[in-house]
Amino acid sequence: MKGKVPQITLLGSNSGNNAGDAAILASILDILSKELPNALFYVPTTNPEFIAKNYGALYNVIPVNIMPWTGSVRLLGIPTIKCFRKSDIALICDGIIFDVKLFNPAFNFLITLVPLVPLAKIFDCKLVCYSTGIGPLQSPAGQWMAKYVMENCDLLMMREKDSLDLCRAVGVSKEIELTGDPAFLNRVSSTERASAILKELGIEKDNFMGFNVTSYVDRWLDPNSRLSDKAAFFDIVLEGIRDASKLCGFKPLLFSTHPMDEDIAVRLAQALNTAAISSRQYLSHDIMAVMRECSLFMGMRFHSLVFASAVGVPILGLVYAPKVRSYFRLLQTEQYGFELKNISSDLLKASIQKAWKEKEAIRAKQQKVVENLKRGAKSAARVLKERYFQEYAVAMDSQRDNRTIAKAHS
């Protein structure tokens, strides 16, 4: 170790805009702080205030500003290099290894990870893919960059098998451990908090079905999987939900987990005479608490589906990106992940109606897998502790045992 305590840099989309990425950050801070008491975390972010306000008092975390005026282009810059100089390891978190808009560093992380690899080596900071999801990787340049980054990691842990298979497909030969998405371990607010949020929104407790729709629509899909008429998407979804709610007797509840999706969520909520819960107003912990009140959930954003699964809600989804298709395959309920190219209001209505009738069977099947994924997410933290900080962990356990003995004799 470079200091008296483990020092760890967390590389990810840590602005707080995306509730899924924020949940990953919160979960990693929480579980690693338990496994490695007093560990110090450096978090490069374009929104240091979000980190400090929401997690500064809970964990030993230092937000590191990477706005352009700090000499940074996305993750690449002087502030991150300074973090490497102090850190023992740097974790590549969540799903930032993809090649969509690859040469636009304002959008893409992978292109800024590549030059960070030799810089990490210079400062003896080991790179780790920590329960990472990768893809899509459709271009030769993106595949080469992803392979380069991962082959130069000291440890590779993937959150699901499709990411592991994609690693092999692009030529990664190193050993890869299969774990689980850290967001499965995200702290969930209380039932009382969920009731208070519903009251704030003017919604009484009801037979809820949750919905999440993203304004990306089909932008992350290959051309053969896209909608034939993207302009009709809003009306298709609206009509499908409205008709299904009448047939099944549920009240729809909209969830927005990214600011860019808030407009479409609010428009749908208004048309359906209901409310939209937005990550602009509520943290991931609160959003998950409200999701727990739903009997069934249909989502598009990957982490909206992870959130619902994590709190025991059966899910179905609209495949806006390959990782959503992968998730339903992982849950062994691939028939409930619906391809956008086939979507219609009638199909949506019929699919929701069928899932509503089968929701307990869906829940039982999905939750068997979810429980394993939660165990995998926990195991990632133990692997990290045992590989890099075993002596420190043993010393901390010894100190804790000594305090317990002293307290027993006092």
Image: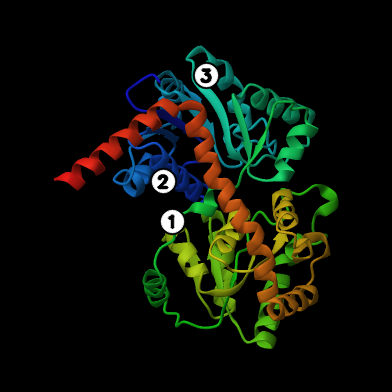
Residue situated in front as seen by the camera: 197 or 379: 379
Q: Nearer the viewer, mark 1 or mark 3?
A: 1
Residue situated in front as seen by the camera: 62 or 378: 378
- The answer, for residue 155, to whether it is visible in the render is yes
- Mark 3 vs mark 2: which is more N-terminal? 2
Inter-mark Cα distance, 1 to 2 = 9 Å
| Lateral position of residue 119 relative to residue 191, left or right | right
In the rendered view, would you say 109 is above or below 18? above
- Graded by Cα atoms within 10 Å as few (under 14), some (14 to 19) or many (20 or more), the crowding at tag 2 reads some
- Mark 1 vs mark 3: which is more N-terminal? 3
> Residue under circle 1?
187
> Residue under circle 2?
30
Q: Position of residue 67 (x, y in %)?
A: 44, 32
Q: Nearer the viewer, mark 3 or mark 2?
A: 2
Q: Position of residue 277 (x, y in %)?
A: 48, 67
Name the disc covering residue 120, or none: 3
| Lateral position of residue 402 relative to residue 48, left or right | left
- Graded by Cα atoms within 10 Å as few (under 14), some (14 to 19) or many (20 or more), the crowding at tag 3 reads many
Q: Secondary structure at mark 3?
A: helix
Q: Position of residue 201 (x, y in %)?
A: 42, 74
Q: Secondary structure at mark 1?
A: loop
- Picture quadrant of residue 111: top right
Contact check, label 1 and label 2, Cβ < 8 Å? yes
Q: Amino acid at mark 2?
A: Asp
- Picture quadrant of residue 35: top left
Which residue is at a point 68% across and 78% down the rendered structure image? Answer: 356
In the rendered view, would you say 32 is above or below 183? above
Q: Position of residue 83 (x, y in %)?
A: 42, 24
- Graded by Cα atoms within 10 Å as few (under 14), some (14 to 19) or many (20 or more), the crowding at tag 1 reads some
